[in-house]
Amino acid sequence: MARLIWTEPALLVLDEIAEYIALDNVAAAKKLVQTIFKKTERLELHPLSGRNPPELKPSNYREIIVGPCRVFYRIVADDIYIIYIMRSEHQLRTYLLDERKTSMNHGKNQEEF
């Protein structure tokens, strides 16, 4: 079974999305966060269940869709790094994912990524 690791930037973005939704509907914000955590936990058993993001083919990144969000992750050995979350209607900028590589690199050789 793979180990799921949330990066700090991913958690911060999830918190920002939830806070924004909570301005109008606290219950919906809580439900979204719970659903995202539940869906990402499935990756521990099925790490390849996400798709390759269409904007990044070919890529080592994968994503799962948890409406209205896209959850980006990367598999490194037996670890699954949740690296970025974004609202589906926003455009993906590849440099954002590149910045997240640094937060995943907990002393590992950069070539692994």
Image: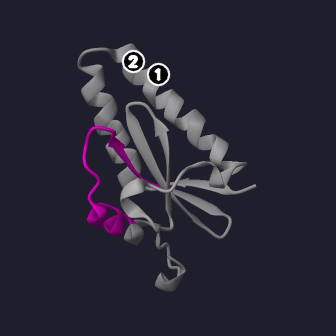
Disc 2 to disc 1: CB gap under 8 Å: yes
Front position in the image: 62 or 83: 62
Q: Is residue 35 above or below residue 55?
A: above
For the residue pair 66 and 41, the one nearer the viewer reads as 66
Q: Residues within 10 Å of mark 1 (few under 14, many from 20)?
A: few
Q: Which residues are magenta?
A: 82-100
Quarter of the figure that contains the N terminus: bottom right
Query: In the picture shown, does residue 24 fall above or below 18?
Result: above
Q: Nearer the viewer, residue 74 or 107?
A: 74
Residue 68, image x and y in percent? 37, 31
Query: Residue at point 64% right, 55% down?
Result: 48
Residue under the point 51% across and 67% down: 60
Residue 3 forms part of the magenta stretch: no
Q: Residue 31's mark?
A: 1
The image quarter in which residue 17 lies: top left
Alpha-carbon distance for marks 2 and 1? 5 Å
Q: Residue 105 at what x, y percent from top left?
A: 47, 73
Element type where label 1 sits in the image: helix
Looking at numbered disc 2 in the image, what kind of residue is underneath it? Answer: Ala
Q: Residues within 10 Å of mark 2 (few under 14, many from 20)?
A: few
Element on which disc 2 rests: helix
Location of residue 66 in the rendering, given as x and y in whole percent from the top left corner:
47, 34
- The residue shown at (44%, 54%) is 53
Q: Seen from this angle, which residue lies furthest right?
A: 1
Q: Any magenta on residue 96?
A: yes
Which residue has dot 2 on it? 28
Q: Answer with left or right where residue 23 lies relative to residue 47.
A: left
Specify the amino acid type for callout 1: Lys
